[in-house]
Amino acid sequence: MFLFTTPPASTRETAPAAAAGARGAAAAEVVEAIRDGAQSTGVGFDYLLATAQRESALDPSAKAGTSTATGLFQFIEQTWLGVMKNAGPKLGLGAYADAITARPDGTYTVADGQARQAILDLRRDPKVAATLAGALTQKNREALGSALGREPTSGDLYAAHVLGARGAATLIGNAQAFPARSAALDLPEAAAANRSLFYERSGRARSSSELYALLSAPAAGRAPAATDLTAVPQAATAYAALDGGLRSLFQTDRRQGAVSEGVARLWQDRAGGRPERAAPTYFPRSDSSGDAMIAATEPSAPAETGAIPAAAPVTVPLPPRRPPEFSGQQAGAAPARPRAGAPLDLSLFMIRSGP
C-alpha cells in the first residue's frame, strides 16, 4: 500500500482546468443574477456589481464572522426580513412576505421557525439576493434624497447599505459639518458591529470624514483622498517656482541643456563667463600717502529683467601706519639700517611713564 500516489498526467492537467472552468461558470451566473436584479428594480448594474464585489467577492455563500451578515450583499437578518416584507409582494415573493410579521418596535419576526430559516437561507440565492439588494437601494435612495436635499451619489448609497439610510445621513452630515469628529460617537451600535470600519488597526477611531471616504470610495470608484466631502487641496510649495523642477539642480549632462532658468538666475549665471570679483589687497603698500582707501569693485553688468543686482563696491580701510618711535625715524623719513656690531637700542622696549 502506497502512502502517496501520483495521479496520471491527464488527471493532473485537466483537474485545475475543470476547477477554473467551474469557478468561471459560477461567477458568470452570479453576474447574470445581479444584472437581472438591477433590471427588475431599476438600479444601476455597475453599482450592484461593485457592492457585491466589495461585500462578498461575488461569493453567494459568504458569511461574516462578527454578525449575521450572509450572502452576496451581506444582509443581516433584520434587514433581510424587513426588505422581504415590504418589497417581496411586488417582486413575486409574496408567499415569503406573508410569513413575516412586523412588530410595533420596528423589528420583524417569523412565527414558524422552519419558515424563518427558509426565508433567511434565500440570502444565499444570487437571484433573490440581487433583487432584494436592488429594492433596498431604491428605498435608501428615496430616504437619502429627502434627508440630503439632493440626489445621492454611489458613495452615499453604499454608506446606506452598510449603515442604513438614517446612519448614512448622520455620517454624511457630520462629514460636512464636523469632519474631525469621531464617527463612533454618533453611531455606537454600527461601530460595535463594524469595528474594522470605525477603527484603524492601531485602535485610533476614524473621523466622520475618514469613514465616509472609506465607505464611498470603492462604490464611487475613486481614491479615498478625493471624495465628494473630503477633497484635499494640493498646497503649492516654494519648489514649484523653480522652472524645470529640482532635477536640474543635479543635472550634469550638457547634451540635455543647462540648468533650468530659475536655478540659473539663483546662480547668477556663473557658468556664463562673468569675471570673478577681485579680492581686496592689503600688502604691499604701493601708495605714498598711506591714507588712501583700497576699493575692490567688479565691472557693472547691464541691467536684465529678473537678474539679481550686482553687489555694492566693497571698500576696505588700510591698517594704521607704524608709529615713528618704533621705527627710529621721523615721519616720512627712510628707515635707518643699524650698523654691524652696534649695541641694541633698548629704549624701543621700555615702557614709557610720562609724556
Image: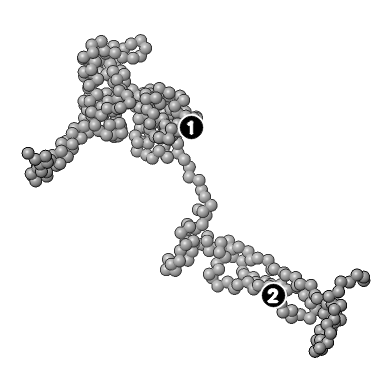
- Report the number of discs: 2
Q: Which residue type carries mark 2?
A: Thr
Label 1: which residue? 179
Quarter of the rendering occupied by the C terminus: bottom right
Reading the chain from its start, which is encountered first: label 1 or label 2?
Answer: 1
Horizontal arrangement in the rendering, residue 147 relative to residue 114 (left or right): right
What is the image's colouring?
Answer: one colour
Q: Which mark is residue 73?
A: none
From what the image shows, is residue 323 above or below residue 150?
A: below
Residue at 51%, 57% in the rendered image? 242
Badge 1 vs badge 2, beta-carbon distance below 8 Å: no
| Residue 61 at x, y percent in the picture | 23, 28
10 Å neighbourhood of mark 2: few (<14), some, or many (≥20)? few
Among the 4 quarters of the image, the one containing residue 322: bottom right
Among the 4 quarters of the image, the one containing residue 253: bottom left
Query: What is the secondary structure assignment of the residue under circle 1?
Result: loop
Query: What is the secondary structure assignment of the residue under circle 2?
Result: loop
Residue at 7%, 44% in the rendered image? 8
Q: Which residue type carries mark 1?
A: Pro
From what the image shows, is residue 118 above or below residue 29?
A: above
Q: Which mark is residue 281?
A: 2
| Residue 91 at x, y percent in the picture | 23, 20
| Residue 57 at x, y percent in the picture | 27, 34
Among the 4 quarters of the image, the one containing residue 268: bottom right
Horizontal arrangement in the rendering, residue 216 relative to residue 317 (left or right): left
> Which one is closest to the eye, mark 1 or mark 2?
2
Quarter of the rendering occupied by the N terminus: top left
Residue nearer the viewer, 84 or 61: 61
| Residue 87 at x, y percent in the picture | 28, 19
